[in-house]
Amino acid sequence: MDFSFTAEQQAFVDSVRRFARDQLAPGAMERAHAGRFPRDVAQLMAKQGLLGIAFSEEDGGQGGELMDAVLAIQEVALHCPRSADVVQAGNFGPIRTFVEYATAQQKARWLPGLVSGETVISLGMSEPDAGSAVTELKTHARIEGAQVVVNGTKVFSTHSPDADLFLVYVRFGPGVDGIGSVVVERNAPGFTVGRPSAFMSGETWSELHFEDCRIPESNILLREGGFRKQIAGFNVERLGNASRSLALGRYCYEQARAYAMTRRQFGRELCEFQGIQWKFAEMKVKLELAQLALYQAVLENPVGLPSAQGTAVAKLACNQAGFEVANEAMQAMGALGYSQESLVEYCVRRTRGWMIAGGSIEMLKNRIAEGVFERSFPQRAPR
Ligand SMILES: Cc1cc2nc3c(=O)[nH]c(=O)nc-3n(C[C@H](O)[C@H](O)[C@H](O)COP(=O)(O)OP(=O)(O)OC[C@H]3O[C@@H](n4cnc5c(N)ncnc54)[C@H](O)[C@@H]3O)c2cc1C
C-alpha cells in the first residue's frame, strides 16, 4: 500500500499548515481553556475552505476526499488542538451523516449555514439509560398528521450548549429496526437545552429535553430502519475522533521532544538519559503504527463511508496511542507538562475522553473481535 502523498495532497497540507500556524496557533492556549464552541474560528475556516472538504461542490463543499479532511484536521490539531474540533464539526460529525442522507430540500435549508460556519450541529444519541447499548434508546417519535412529536432525554452531546441544530436518534417503533433520526432546531416548541455541564476536558454539554416537541415531518432524516445507515455515517465521526487523538498525541510528543533537547538536569540535557530516550522511542513507534491504521481505514474506501472494522481498528489504535503518548510526554516534561503553562495537560485530558466518546475502547474491542471470529457476539443478557 502506498502511503506517500500526491503533489496535490502535499500542497494542501502545506497550505493548511501555513493557515494554522499563522492564524490559529497564536490563540491556541486561550481557545483550549474557553470551553464553548469557537464560532469565530468556524467562520475563518469556512473562508479557508476547511468546512465540507469532502462534500460535493453541489452541497457547498470542496469536492475533496475523506483523506483531505483527515490531513486538514491533523494539521490544524498540531497548531491549535481546540480548533481541530471545528474541523470535526464541519466535516466528520453529525454534519457528515446529514449530508449522506438528507433530501435536497433539507440540504438547501440547513447546509449553507453549516458549511459557512454560521451554524453548528450537535448529535443527540446517548441517553441516561442508553450509552454503549445505544440501541436501547427510548426517545420516542410519533407521527401525527404532518408533524412528528418527540419525547425523551439526551445526554453528553458535544457542542449542545451552542448548537443551532440537533441530529437526534429517535425510536419510531420497537427494536433496532424501529430506530431512525430527526433534525431538531434549537427553537422547536417543546425542546429545551439544559444548563451546561463540563467534561474533564473543559468542553461543555447540556441535557436535551423533548416534551411533546413538535417538528414538521419534513425534518425526518431517516425513518425506522435507518439505524445501520446512521452508524455507517457515524464511522466517519469516529475517524475524526481518531485523527484528533493521534494528532494531539503527536503535538505533545513534539513539545516534549523540544523540551528534552533543551532542559538540563544533572549537568546534561534530558535527552541524554537513556530512560528518557526509550520513552521517546516507544512514543514514536506508537504514533507511527496508529498513523498507518488510520490511513488504512481512510484509504479502504476514499470516497464512500469507511468500514466498521477498519474504523474500529483505527480508532482503538489512535485513541490508545494518543492518550498514552500525551501522558508520557507530560511525564517527560515534569511539572511544566502538568501545568497550564503548556497545552500538554489539556491534550492529556482531551485524549482521555476519546477513549470513551464515540464508541469506548472496550466496545471497539468487541467489534474487532467479531471480525476476528467472523461471528456476532450479542452483548445483551439472554432473556
Ligand atoms: C468527550 C465526550 C463527548 C461525547 N459526545 C457525545 C455526543 O456528541 N453525542 C452523544 O450522543 N453522546 C456523546 N458522548 C457520549 C458517549 O457516546 C458515551 O459516553 C459512550 O457511548 C459510552 O456510554 P456511557 O458513557 O453511558 O458508558 P456505559 O455504556 O455506561 O459504559 C461504562 C463502561 O462500561 C464499559 N462497557 C459497557 N458495555 C460493555 C460491554 N458490552 N463490554 C465491555 N465493556 C462495556 C464501557 O466501555 C465503559 O468503560 C460523549 C462522551 C464523551 C466522553
Image (cartoon, rainbow, N blue to C red):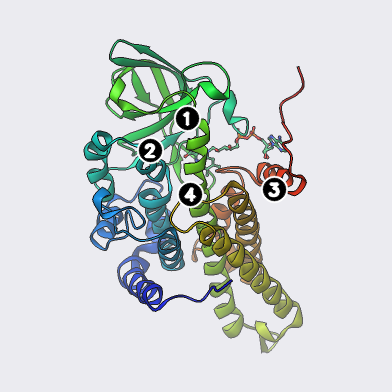
Determine the secondary structure under disc 4.
loop
Determine the secondary structure under disc 1.
loop
Earlier in the chain: of badge 3 and badge 1, it is: 1
- Specify whether tag 1 is near ligand 1 (CB below 8 Å): no
User: Is residue 128 in sight in this rendering?
Assistant: yes
Left or right of 137: which side holds 381? right
Q: Which residue position is annotated with label 1?
A: 226
- The quadrant where ligand 1 appears is top right
CB under 8 Å between discs 1 and 2: yes
Earlier in the chain: of badge 1 and badge 2, it is: 2
Structural distance between the alpha carbons of marks 1 and 2: 10 Å
Q: Which mark is residue 305?
A: 4
Residue 291 is drawn in which quadrant?
bottom right
Structural distance between the alpha carbons of marks 2 and 4: 12 Å
- Percent of width and height locating residue 254: 54, 74
Q: Which mark is residue 101?
A: 2
Q: Which mark is residue 215?
A: none
Quadrant, the N terminus: bottom right
Q: Residue at x 32, y 35 (%)?
A: 165
- Specify whether tag 2 is near ligand 1 (CB below 8 Å): no
